[in-house]
Amino acid sequence: MSVDDQHEAGDAPEVDAVVVGAGFSGLYMLHRLRELGLSVRVYEKADGVGGTWYWNRYPGARCDSESHIYCYSFDDDLLESWEWSERYPEQPEILDYLNFAADHLDLRRDIEFETEVTAATFDDGTGLWEVETADGQRVTTRFFISAVGCLSEPFMPDFDGLDEFAGEWYHTSRWPDGGVDFDGKRVGVIGTGSTGIQTIPEIAERAGHLTVFQRTPNYAVPARNRPLEEDEYEEIRANYDDIWERARYSRLGMPFDSEENSARRLSEKEIHEILEKRWQQGGFRFLHAFEPGHVLSNEETNEIISEFIRSKIRETVDDPDTAEILVPTDHPYGSKRPPMDYNDYYGTYNREDVSLVDVDSAPITEFTADGIRTTDDHYDLDIVVFATGFDAMTGALLAFDIEGRNGHSLEEKWSAGPQTYLGLGINGFPNLFTITGPQSPSVLTNMPMAIEQHVEWISDCIEYMDSEGYSHIEPTEESESQWVSQTNMLADQMLFSEADSWYRGENVPDKPTVFTPFPGGLEMYRDICETVREKGYDGFELRRAADAPTAEQ
């Protein structure tokens, strides 16, 4: 019996849409689908909303986008009634904001907390998705929507002897709710990416002695965090329409102006003057010293910027040998996620109670009962913190079993790397949408801007399907292949390939090495998605329900 015949025979979904995850993406997706009059069920494995900001409670956890643009833009009442306290919001404040938004929009009644999705299977007979949860629930739905996030599946290195370690150990993205007592303890932190750079100064303030195990140094730019003044916030509110317009139609989803002069036409002295001004401004405004696409495509300009940051590190760190270990030389600035320094990260290494271990030259060989052994020493430790990041972009999607048409699994399809169309849909998986999925701008932008664009595109698509009588949508194999090729082509034209990064899956052993975000910027991507929509969802195959009215009717 065909899918259409099954629908005529009375097969009906229990809900119109299932959404997995109740962070920024899932909450907004629920709100938009409700506005369409659809029945929606959100599954969230945590006991509260927040997504990544629920789980990442480690000391120093903070957003690297400025607070006034790290929020929803679609609701004027939310913008008027919420006020951020600092330029860069800390984890507790972001979590408070998302709880406030969930209450403001009355979203909790459609969210099942402490419920983990374990599988989702497309039934070729009924044309519906069946979603299973760890507690044994099964629900059928027309649309299956992933809002699991890009950075939500922790990566833990496989160290020998960890089970023998007699002390405590924690991963930053699964931090205990009650916190960790570091006072007077010998603490080790493994990892100096964005998370490590945030938490290392905080832990150093409390630990008896801190040992940092660094494999790869990073370029950390000062955030220049500070409290927001009342008159400053009044100006932001008065100009929000313009702020959002500029953010939506920018490369990074941020309303910051790049310098008008191209670096190609400036002397090195003039470039340094611009960089110094932007260094004092801090944050991603530094990346806007020149057009970000130029910074990430022009080797000469990038090297000037990279060397500028290196010189700042050397100026800050007292010990020359320690400074050189902290100076990145193996990748261009911006080819990895650019970290922010909120609390004098480099200055932390001037403390007598902080040690730096270069595990690139002396790798960790094993954990012992008393600590960590490298190839040339042993370090006695009471607590170890893993700031080792995530199985990014694909890890959370592959953490549960997804089967599409003909029983084909997503894990099999992505065995050589993710394949999507626009990061929104996947050939072979009808009515599956991925919010900020692989091969969308996502982590290369201010995430709420990318999330809102995706959620609005998905909800507009579903509204179109229902109004026109379409039952299923699925990318064609050709459009998916072309999109993957276009994403790779753009990345190859930039400097991303010169870094071993989680953008390319290279932090996880045996993971396919493929550049996963779309590197063309949010503005270009938004224009592409809008063109696809205007052309009747070009690149997608739309199938009409048998009982839909025809033009003749």
Image (cartoon, rainbow, N blue to C red):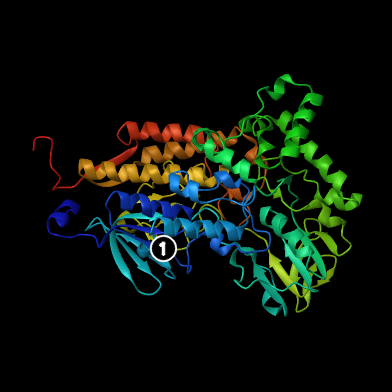
Where 222 falls versus 408 (above or below)?
above
Residue 475 in view of the camera? no
- Locate residue 48, reporting x and y percent: 48, 66
Q: Would residue 147 be found to the left or right of residue 91 on screen?
A: left
The residue that appears at 36% across and 64% down in the rendered structure is: 109
Instruction: From the viewer's perspective, tell me whether residue 164 is left or right of residue 95.
Output: right
Q: Nearer the viewer, residue 177 or 386?
A: 177
Crowding near pointer 1: few (<14 within 10 Å), some, many (20+)? Answer: some
Front-most of 276 and 524? 276
- x, y (%) of residue 371? 77, 74
Count the marks.
Answer: 1
Give the answer, above or below, for where 223 lies relative to 257: below
Residue at image location 70% in from the left, 76% down from the top: 168
Q: Quadrant of residue 364?
A: bottom right
Which secondary structure lies at badge 1? strand
Residue under label 1, please give it.
Answer: 401
The quadrant where residue 134 appears = bottom left
Residue 146, image x and y in percent? 41, 55
Residue placed furthest toward the top: 265
Is any atom of residue 375 visible in this view? yes
Q: Residue at x 38, y 59 (%)?
A: 106
Query: Which quadrant, please, contains the N terminus?
Result: bottom left
What amino acid is found at the position of numbered circle 1 in the picture?
Asp
Find the residue positioned furthest to the front. Answer: 231
47 left or right of 211 in image: left
What is the quadrant of the C terminus in the image?
top left
Residue 311 placement: quadrant: top right
